[in-house]
Amino acid sequence: MSEEKKSLNFIEQIIEEDLAKGMPKENLCFRFPPEPNGYLHIGHTKAIGINFGLGEKYNAPVNLRFDDTNPNKEEQEYVDAIKNDIVWLGYQWENELYSSDYFQQLYDWAVLMIKNGKAYVDSQSSEEMREQKGTPTEPGINSPFRTRSVEENLSLFQKMKDGKFQEGEHILRAKIDMTSPNMLMRDPIMYRVLYKEHHRTGNDWNIYPMYDWTHGESDYIEQISHSLCSLEFKPHRDLYNWFRDQVYEYGKAQFPNPPKQREFSRLNLSYTIMSKRKLMRLVEDNIVSGWDDPRMPTISGLRRRGYTPTSIRNFIDTVGVSKRENVIDVSLLEFKIREDLNKTANRVMGVLNPVKVMITNYPEEKEEILIADNNPEDENAGSRELPFSREIYIEKEDFREEANKKFFRLKLGKEVRLKNAYIIKAESCTKDSEGNIIEIQCTYDPLSKSGSGTAESMRKVKGTLHWVSIKHALKAEVRAYDRLFSEEAPDIHKDKDFMEFLNPNSLEIINAYVEPSLEKATVGERFQFQRLGYFNVDDDSRSDALVFNKTVGLRDSWSNKKS
């Protein structure tokens, strides 16, 4: 086997084998088929990456098809959000399609199946159907309505369509095998009566097709060559093929290429919920501010938190394509955004927990403009002006009156360098009535200015601190996000609700000070706050009220919290 062959994932190997067996390359066609009943989340990015990635690899079309068969849960808001997310990730679909486009064709095929004895109208209650369907170890029994005549079935199905029955009074079922070991093959439901306005077809239909009937036939109508889905749909493959083979007999003249379904492992992420139903609950119960809350695993939430399309695509590439289910550590996703932002994010300074520093020998009225590089990883990033004055803020935790030799930040009698500025030495400090330090008095070495070329400027000290000039600093709200759940697998406990594992400290609001260059920062712009982490400008931010979201710290601190 060649090295190129070895490097192919198993889906690519299947495609290559099909091409080698004579499938014309121009017949290749893929699709991403979300149901518009919620926002896309990080789990969907694997399916997006696989399907659109294959389209790019083989120069083949990729359809975006909305499987919109359940008007009870589907909304135009979700359609718009899904399209926005896919474009943001950097992908473009060939055709925007909807399963609802095919409602008439699906209905016509269902009528043909009734005529050919492959479908019937069942009038049992849902409880009766459950009882007669059997168990995984016991066969089901036939419905008493399974032997209805073709004429009666056609009449009842037409009346279902015409709105003559109540919801639940009748359904249309495929006639397959009630003794099949695969319970999905035990006469599955094809249509149900549902009086609900559809987001596209309005009130045109009183019956709606079920997912298993609609999905495969939509693939067939679109001539999808490889229908790729996650492993939970593997038991559905028999039914997919059965429905496909029925309609192929009716449609092969117009649709000559039957699709094939293949499955890959879904993306599971630690400390993360992937169920849209559970994510909906977080939104509806106001645990989060909405689908785009930066703590949510939705693509819109990740975008608002500061993640980049590149970091997510690199994450998906690293995870790869496999047939085995596993849980990916969320730290890998966080590593990918650090890796990307380290190359692309400009460096700035902000102080989140400030304490005042008075440089006593710095002239009281003096101000100067220092020059700082925007990003040492990018030689084209340029530089910015950084004002400096006698009074500055540093982080409270960067000062101790006394400390051991391993503490390389500011302490009484010792020196540190201020980033892009001078070396200072702590001489004394002032405390309030409760013993809290409210000001540190320091002296500075005027010859130690960074980049000045003097011997003093190159003098080595062990600590370097970030800071902001009090006179010039801007107030900003910083939203420091942590993981939404404190449990690695919050939704696998059968005896506990996943909501019991919510992290009460998943959001901290901080009143911070940032350097004045950020006054014109725009929504979505990303920065590295030096020594603190990566932050981006939130949607709520305004020029007179800056709001930053913490995307991720400079290093993984979660493993330390767990130990």
Image: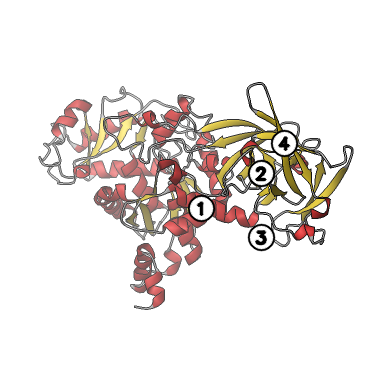
* Residues tagged 1 and 3 counted as in contact (Cβ below 8 A): no
Q: Residues within 10 Å of mark 3 (few under 14, many from 20)?
A: few
Kindly identify the residue that appears in the image at 34 percent across and 36 percent down: 491
User: 101 or 4, which lies in front?
Assistant: 4
User: 412 or 85, which lies in front?
Assistant: 412
Give the mark nearest the N terminus, 2 or 1: 1
Q: How is the image coloured?
A: secondary structure
Cα gap from disc 4 to disc 3, whole angstroms: 37 Å
Q: Which residue is mark 4?
A: 428
Kindly identify the residue that appears in the image at 38 percent across and 29 percent down: 499
Q: Amino acid at mark 2?
A: Leu
User: 171 or 300, which lies in front?
Assistant: 300
* Residues tagged 2 and 4 counted as in contact (Cβ below 8 A): no
Q: Amino acid at mark 4?
A: Ser
- The number of discs equals 4
Residue 335: horizontal and vertical position, in percent? 51, 53
